[in-house]
Amino acid sequence: MIQIEINQSSIEKIQKLVSENQTFVITSHHNSDGDAVGSSTAVAEVLRKMGKEVKIILPNDFPSFFRWMVGAGDILTFDRHRKEALAFLDKADVLICLDFNQYGRVDELEPVLINWNKKCIVIDHHLGLQIQADAIVSVPEASSTCELVYRVLTLCGFDSFITKVVAESIYAGIMTDTGRLDYASSYAGVYEVVGKLIEKGVNKVYVHDKIYNVYTYNRLCLQATILKENMVYLPEYHAVYLTISLKNQKDFSFQLGDSEGFVNIPLAMRDVKFCAMFTEYENGLVKVSLRSKRDFPASDFASQFYSGGGHFNAAGGKFQGTLQDAVKVFREGLEVYKEKLQK
Ligand code: 5GP
Ligand code: MN
């Protein structure tokens, strides 16, 4: 049975950093997801309620279906608000890094983080943490960074600051990172945390409506088109891949977050163990998303072929080149992993 253990010395360091400092900057990974925005907005709100000055600075924009979270409207994105962000970074006492494990995950914020010479806190659940910090909570077994944030806040004695809106952000991060308690949730601890959040007043129907029932007609048509026209099933490898070209994006007026969740759909097939989704970007870059079932290491595949990483069953990376070439590398990778896929 998985036990989420957070060592007491990290908690004491966080308590001290919070009590001794006044200005905090929170950041998370590029293309922030529900766990990134949820953990950032939750921590920011708690610190604000304590009377601290706080700013969330994300590398780039995030999907509109996370904008309902507390304080999300005040988030700065480094690609668009660089000057304002740098000014705040300059005066901040403490940097809090949430939901990422490598400096390379924050785009243009990377040099700022690498050269950060003030205090730093990291809370994360990815494999292989590579970020230096004064206080670190890194637990790859945890369902989500949001679950860790809940645990850290309560262990620090900040439970009274977890108001309903903070609980909603934390709940949203747990739901999105676990596929609504499907994957990464086979231990009692995550249900205990969800129970506590419901006790705090989280309205599950409201949160799910805000995140999941937000498709536009275009988004649903994009999904249908990708599954019908751009899905390739490779039964000999128990694998599937999907491609989303720039043309597909143009045809359906693609908005950030519109392809969220698509890569999981083919895993519903009985004998599919591994699925990849390749999304074409303007600058000759292809974003790669990988999902697997059971013992197939998506994270190894991502680091070996796409300079990426992530979790054992949910990973990602990048490829410089065309969609066709990214797929070619995928097919070569499948051959390398054939034995594991056929098991
Ligand atoms: P997604 O496919 O949803 O973008 O990402 C799935 C998981 O892989 C997430 O946990 C994410 O943090 C990780 N991931 C995605 N892209 C990259 C990447 O380029 N590098 C690394 N190290 N991890 C990534
Ligand atoms: Mn996460």
Image: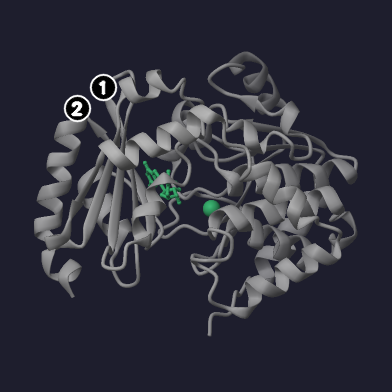
Determine whether label 2 and label 1 are within 8 Å by CB: yes
Residue at (54, 55) in percent of width and height: 177
Horizontal side, residue 255 vs residue 280: left or right: right
Q: Quadrant of the C terminus?
A: bottom left
Q: Earlier in the sequence, mark 2 or mark 1?
A: 1
Please tell me how crowded label 1 is: few (under 14), some (14-19), or many (20+) other residues with Cα within 10 Å. Answer: few
Q: Residue at x 32, y 46 (%)?
A: 308
Which amino acid, mark 2? Thr
| SS for callout 1 | loop
Q: Amino acid at mark 1?
A: Gly
- Residue 154 image offset from top left, x and y in percent: 79, 65
Estimate the x, y position of residue 94 in percent, counting from the top left. Answer: 69, 41
Snapshot quadrant of residue 234? bottom left
> Is any atom of residue 97 visible in this view?
no
Query: Quick check: 19 left or right of 60?
Result: right
Nearest the viewer among 294 and 119 is 294
Provide the residue designation for mark 2.
322
Q: Quadrant of residue 146?
A: bottom right
Is 118 above or below relative to 195? Answer: above
The answer to whether the residue bearing label 1 lies less than 8 angstroms from the nearest atom of ligand 1 is no
**Distance from mark 2 CB to nearest ligand 1 atom below 8 Å:** no
Q: Position of residue 18 (x, y in %)?
A: 79, 50
Which of the two residues, 80 or 134, is positioned nearer the viewer here?
Answer: 80
Q: Which mark is residue 284?
A: 1
Q: Is residue 221 above or below residue 228?
A: above
Direction from residue 34 to residue 15 in the image, left or right: right
Image mark for residue 188: none
Q: Quadrant of residue 321?
A: top left
User: Residues under labels 2 and 1: Cα distance?
Assistant: 6 Å
Using the image as rendered, state which of residue 199 and residue 304 is in the foreground: 199
